[in-house]
Each structure stands twice: as C-alpha cells, then as structure tokens.
Amino acid sequence: MMRATTETRQAVRKGERTREGILRVAVDLASVEGLEGLSIGHLAKTLKMSKSGLFAHFGSKRDLQLATIEMARSIFVDYVVHPALAEPAGIQRLWKLCDRWIGHVEEKVFAGGCFFSAASFEFDSRPGPVRTAIVAAMKEWLGILTRAVEEAKKAGHIKDGVNASSFALEIYSIAVGSQWAFQLLDEKRAHRDARETILSRIRSQVTSAARRGEFARLLKF
C-alpha cells in the first residue's frame, strides 16, 4: 500500500510538471500569435506531441486557453507582484510594481511582450469565458496598483486628495501605451519614457515628507 501511494504521488507530480511545461510553451505561443490562434493541434505540433497526449491534459481548445491565461497570471505575479510586495508599503512598493511591470516586457518574460495587454485587445469585444478570465486578471492587477496607491497615501507619501483608482488607471494607461509603442512602432525609448512619465506623475502628488530622505533619490528631487 505504501509503495502504491508513493508511486501514485510521483505520477501526479510528473503529470503536473508535464502540464506546467506545456503551458509555458502555450503562454509564449499565445503572446506572439494570440489566444484565438492557440489550438491543441498547433500546440501538439510545436511540442512534437500527439494530440491525444494533449487531450489528456486539456479536453478542449477553451480549456487550453483558460489554463494558459492562468499560467500567464502566475508568471506575471511571480515576476512583477511578489518582488514588489517585498518592499515597504508606500512609494517604494508602488514604484517597484511599475518598474517590474515595464521591465517584464523589456526582458521578454513573455515572448510576445505583455501577455495580458495583447489578450485584452484581442478579446475586448468577444464575450465568453475566455474574455471573463482576462477581465478578472486585469481587474486584479488594477486592484493591486490601486491598493499600492492607497498604501502610499496611508504612509503619508501621497497626498490625501489623490483618487487611488484614477491614479492607478493613469499609471496603467502610460505603461500600456509604452508597450504598444515598443512592440508596434519599435520605439526604443518607449520604456524609458514611460518610467520617466510615471515618476513625474508620482512626483507631482507626493507630500512634503516624501520629498526628504530615501525618497529624494527615488523621486529624483
């Protein structure tokens, strides 16, 4: 019985590793070619696997798309969100979120750029479970940015009158614009310009206390 249980657990772990490896390839494919272009047949050809082997992990194209979105979310959280949450609440955490978000495109964490920006444009007018999953991921990200602004206000770094959700949306728009300029227009300065613009907007809303000490260097006062 003990041996059978151990072998079962090993088989489960092996299956999980295989699924994760498949989804990492799927994420890169979808970031370049779009989620709608992601199919079990196309993925099987890319991985040199049989379709039946992939069907064992994903029963349909929709299941594959949804699992790919969840994998992309997990990668994004690991690269962008977790390092930022290690920073003290306030301007440092807010800036880390912005810097890592822009940086994940620069460093090609996803082969095609920002997975969720591309997916958002692709499915913004297509109702259904795939769009719902993308919306949930983007709302979660905007919520994280909004909370970071709220924390910066509570820490006395950002002025009380700043609307956290509006400010987060403004930061989001600047970063997405830079991704578009970099990917489509091949603007080499796009990411640097986005960082400078976001810092300028943060600088315009900081309190006098945030202009002193460690924040002076961060905000270039």
Image (spheres, grey):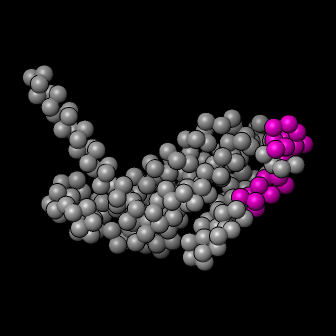
The image quadrant where one finds the N terminus is: top left
Would you say the magenta stretch is mainly helix, strand or loop? helix
Can residue 154 be seen? yes
Image-quadrant location for residue 103 = bottom right
What residue appears at the point 71 percent right and 42 percent down from the top-left corner? Answer: 92
x, y percentage for residue 155? 77, 36
Span colored in magenta: 195-217
Above/below status of 143 relative to 192 = above
What residue appears at the point 55 percent right and 60 percent down from the top-left corner? Answer: 105
Depth check: 192 or 136 in front?
Answer: 192
x, y percentage for residue 21? 31, 51
x, y percentage for residue 89? 69, 37
Above/below status of 93 relative to 196 = above
Image-quadrant location for residue 133 = bottom left
Can residue 128 be seen? no
Depth check: 197 or 123 in front?
Answer: 197
